[in-house]
Each structure stands twice: as structure tokens, then as C-alpha cells.
Image (cartoon, grey):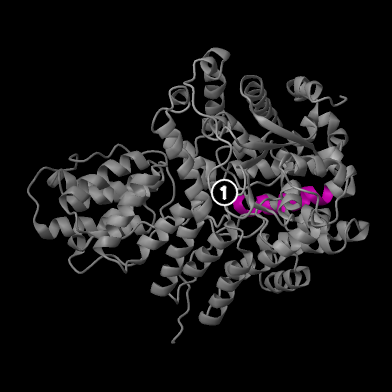
Amino acid sequence: MAKKPTPKDPAKPFSPGVAAPGRFSPTVGLPASAIGKGPVKPAITVPGGNSLGGFKPGVGPSRAPASPADITRLLQLGGGHLAAGRLDHAGKAAAAVLGFQPKNPDGLHLLGLVALGKGEPATAEKLIAAAAAVMPKHVNVWVNLGNAQRDQGKTDEAVLSYHHAEMLKPDYPDVFLNRGQLYQETSQFAEAIADFERLIELQPDQATSYLRAASAAADAGKFREAIAYCEEAIDRLDVVPLQIETILATTHERLGNLDEAIARAESILVRKPENAGALRTWSKARRRKIRHDPELLAELRHRLEKANPGKMKSSDARLVYSELAQICDEQGDTEQAFSYFVLLNDRTSQLPSLKNVDRTKFIDDLDQLLGVFTSKFVSEWRSLPEIEIEPGHASVPVFLVGFPRSGTTLLDQILDAHPGVQVFEEMPLLSKVKKVASSSGYPLSLGTMTKEQRTGLRQVYWNALKDAGADLEGKLVINKMPLDIAHAGLVSRVFPEARFIFASRHPADCVLSCFMQDFVPNASMLNFLTLEGSAQLYDRVMTLWERYRELLPLKVQEVRYERLVADLRAEVEPALTFLGLAWDDAVSDPAAHALARGTIRTPSYSQVTQPIYSSATERWRRYEEQMKSVLPILRPHIERLGYAS
């Protein structure tokens, strides 16, 4: 196969852990009617903005008649401005077209693309939908309509638009690029990977195809598959972007192949010494290989500080600040470590991908649940039959919950090592149940739920587990998603037989660790960008959990992190008994199991692949000065859980 260079592939930032391309939202060129000779070929990534600049359909510089050639020239001019990122100029051209012809579909489409580029997806959807109504057979209009819906969180509508585009033109690459991105963002990883594999078939000489497939595989915890996509790209492409090589280096580090990770990172740094992803991987792999070596830590710190992250763009700077913070923490330089953690979170908050994220939604949802779940509400629930176990299943459903950074990943590895257990790590399985329940008015609808409705919701969950590969007939299946703790009320109503493993840890350690952790940012994790936000989220989540414990007959076994790292068997064996399982020595070495498993998707992958240590207990006391402002928020929970303050 003839290979072609790929200079057009965009240089995109990489997320921590497994490097992954940032959101790539191409806007497809104007339809054939705009220029008369087929669609504009290059994909266009439009920069953000604040407003449409006052341009509206039907408002143009003149109402004088215009010839078809004049309209075409205006559309070509607008398309050129759009491709160059000159959104205001593109908007003026579109407004001029619509001034002459208020319902011109290409003018509506163009103005919609301007709105999309300026971060106004709702306006974009209205304009592009109007264009689609006039020219329903233009595939790129439907792709862009899906993009506008996706950027508003309208997942179902966006999928329908992408499917419509695929029906019009089954071999149109942008369908699979954009729909795959939507699936990846909504944690539908199997679907995302399938779309990106199709993209590879259609564009085998484009690096973006492999980047996306590797990114989705990594997000799914399929790190070896991610490596395979990178290696396929290296074999096929004449020009291999550093992004692919960086993904490869970082994925090897995730899998514990430290020498390979170091060698690949060093190769990148020879060519681009300030490559943030390679710098972080190189440093982290060396720290993991030789732990707590003062000379090595000093060397790494000097190298990363010399890279001058303050002058890097946010997506790169955050990677370097994250690693510098961890190095300083290991050195015992808590003041500088904390400063770097602040810089990390400040830069994270500036990421363009977070521009349209609703930063209060998760807190608002918690407040709604706290307002709904009262003793009166629960006392009025419709009576439903008890359930012992789903017919044909080996066990009742089990949910591993707790506040993030409370030891859930360590406990996940311990339990998954048991031959009778299968743990699913941080997959949005319960969210599918919540989505269906929400269509009927969840959480208020819990009170009036019928037996038939409950059966339907249960089936949604079983189907989600089966799609994920659960052996429901042969094993005890555990769903580990820490913040599913917020929906324990839903679980109790739909799965009255369910059991909860509740991971607990000193509240101050949880909150500090969340603030220090470089999570992949989303609506809930954005609360961790400040200590105050972390503490307030902890307060709401744990207050809601206690409310559930008071009002509902939850079957719960607590596993306390501090006791777990001090005496694994003494803490884990009662949990196994609670689940109806006998002790098995396989659970005694979670580090070995984690390395063999090779699919740890959480940020604590590097901790659980080493022998159990207790140095993280009472870590917050080293940062007590910085924690002073949030300790009053946490005090009631510290006392309730029995921790000495």
C-alpha cells in the first residue's frame, strides 16, 4: 500500500495517564451547492469566541437582487474565512447571503458553523437544522447538526443525526470521527472503537484515525489494544506524529513496562525537548523504577522546572505541573508541592474542552436528591415484592462505592483477584438505569414505581453488564463506580437485594488527595480543582449517603482504608463473608493482580501496582496549614466516622 505523509493532522494535547488527543471537532465543508464543484475537503477546527457578533438570518448589507454567481462568491468567501478561523468575517458573508435570500440553506449552514465555532451550539443547532430541512440529502449538514447537538449534551439527538448522515453516505469519514468522539465522551467505548476502526479503514493514511482508536481503547482500559493501534500507525504512515509516539510511551508506563516507556520518551525528547507528554512519562516512569531516591528526584525536578511550564499552553503545562507536584511531595517540600497542585488545577480549569461543561450540575443533582429524600417521601413509597436473587444469576448485584480516593481502586484489585468475582471498573453502567428512570421523573418517580417498571429498569442494567462482558451466571459481579454512592436510593428501589461495599478513609485525606489528583476533568471532577470545592462535594455526597443509610434498608459492609493497608486479611475477609465468599489467597497480592490485569483505568494505577504501603495514611497532616480553611466543613464527618481530628 502506498503510504502518504500526514502533515495535516492537528497537534493536540494529551490527557494525563494515557495520552489522548483532545476534542477534535471538525466542521465539514459547505455542501456542493455552495461552490458548485463538490464539498470543501479540509476539515476545519474553528476557534472559540463569545458571540455571533450580531449577525442574524435575513440581515445583510443590501436587499438588492443578487445573481446565483454573486451568492456563490459570497459563500466561497465565507467558507474561506471560516477555514482560516476568521469567524466574524465568515459571519458577515453568511449574513450577506441571507440578506439576499433569507432561506438560503448554505447561508444558514455557514452561519451555523460560525455559531458552533464561537461556542454557541444551541444557536448553531437551530441554523443548521433549518438548512437540513431545505437540503436534507447533504451529509455534511447532518454531521454538523450532530456536532451542535453533541456540544449541548444532546446525546440521543446527536446519534440520530450521525446515523442519518451515515445512511446518506456510508463511507463518509467525518461521520465515524464525530460519532466515535461522542461515544467515547459518553463512555460507550465498544461503539467508539468500532467507529474509529471504520475510520482507519476509510483513511488508513491519516494519523487521526489511529490516534482516536488508541485513545478510545485506552479510555476503555484496553491498553494493549491501544499499543497495537499505535504500532499499526507506525507501520503504515511515512510521517508519524509525535502524538502517536507519546501515546505509545505513556501506555507502556501505564502497563508497568518502564524501560520501554523511558526509552520511547527519551527518543521523543531528543527531537522535541519540551514535549510535555513525553516529559511527564519519562519522569514518572523513572520515579516508579527507582522509588524515593533523593538524587533522582532532584534531577527530575530540575529538568521539569527548566522546561518552564509557565510559558506552555494549559493542556501541556498541567501535565508538567502535575509531575512537579508529585516530585515535590515525595521530597517533603509540601509548600512547593501545594503551589504546583494549585497551578495544575488552575491550568485544568482553563482547558477549552471545559468551556461548555456545566460546573454546577453535579452539585445541583445532589441538592435535589437531598431535598427529595425525606422520611415522608420514603414512607409513602408503593409497596413492591422483595427479591432474593435474579433467576439464573450467580449472585445479587454488588456496588463498590465511596468518595473518590478512599481506596476503591485498591479494593477493586483485591476483590477482582478472587476467582469467584468479576469487577467492572468505573463504567457508567448505573447511569443507563438512571437515564431511563429520569424519563419517568426520577427521583420523584421512585415512590410510584410499579413492579413492571422496576423489572424494566433491572433489565436495562443486566443488558449493560452483559454488553460489558459480565459473567452473571458464573460469578459475583461487582460494579465499582465510587460516585454511584449518590444514587444508592435508586439502587435500593430497583435492586432491593443489592449489597454495597463502602470504602471509607479519613475525610481530610480524601479531600486533599482529590485536590492533588490529576483526574480527567468532567462535571463532577471539576469540583476538585479547589480544596473548598473538594470539601463541599465531600460534605454533600457523604451527607446524602448518611441520609440513605437512615431511611433505607441498605445492606452495607464498610472497608476502612487505614485498616486495610495495616492488615489486609483482617479487613477483607469480613467483606468476603458478607458477599458469601470464602477467603482465597489470591486476594493477598493485589499488586501482582493489577500488573497481570493491565486494565486499570483510574489515576491510582501506579499506586496499586506496587506492594501495599501505609505512607498515604494521615497524609493530610503534612498539609495541615493549607487544610485549615476546609477542616470545619469536614469536622462533622470526621467525628461521625470516628477519626481523631
Mark 1 residue element = loop
**Apparent side of residue 532 relative to residue 234 in the rendered image (left or right):** right
Q: Locate residue 390 relative to residue 91 in the image: left or right.
A: right
Please check the rendered image and state whether residue 137 is part of the magenta-colored stretch, yes or no: no
Does residue 89 appear in this view?
Answer: no
For label 1, the crowd category at 10 Å Cα-Cα, with few meaning under 14, some 14 to 19 and many 20 or more, is: some
- Residue placed furthest toward the right: 294
Is residue 327 located in the magenta-colored stretch of the structure? yes
Identify residue for label 1.
393
| Percent of width and height locating residue 427 | 57, 49
The amino acid sitting under disc 1 is His
Residue 386 position by quadrant: top right
**What secondary structure do most residues of the magenta stretch adopt?**
helix
Q: Nearer the viewer, residue 574 or 641?
A: 574
Residue at image location 30% in from the left, 43% down from the top: 125
Q: Which segment did they paint magenta?
A: 312-328
Residue 604 versus residue 113: which sits nearer the camera?
Answer: 604
Q: Residue at x 58, y 37 (%)?
A: 388
In the image, is residue 375 above or below residue 443? above
Name the residue nearer the viewer: 110 or 222. 222
Question: Would residue 450 appear left or right of 343 to someone viewing this image?
Answer: left
- Specify the quadrant of the image occupied by residue 537: top right
- The residue at the point 66 percent across, 20 percent down is 550
Q: Residue furthest bottom?
A: 1
Marker count (numbered): 1
**Where in the figure is residue 578, as x and y percent of width and height?**
74, 39
At horizontal 37% and vertical 50% (from top left) the residue drawn is 147
For the C terminus, the image quarter is top right
* Quarter of the figure that contains the N terminus: bottom left
User: Residue 251: horizontal and vertical position, in percent?
Assistant: 66, 65
Residue 461 image point, x, y percent: 50, 44
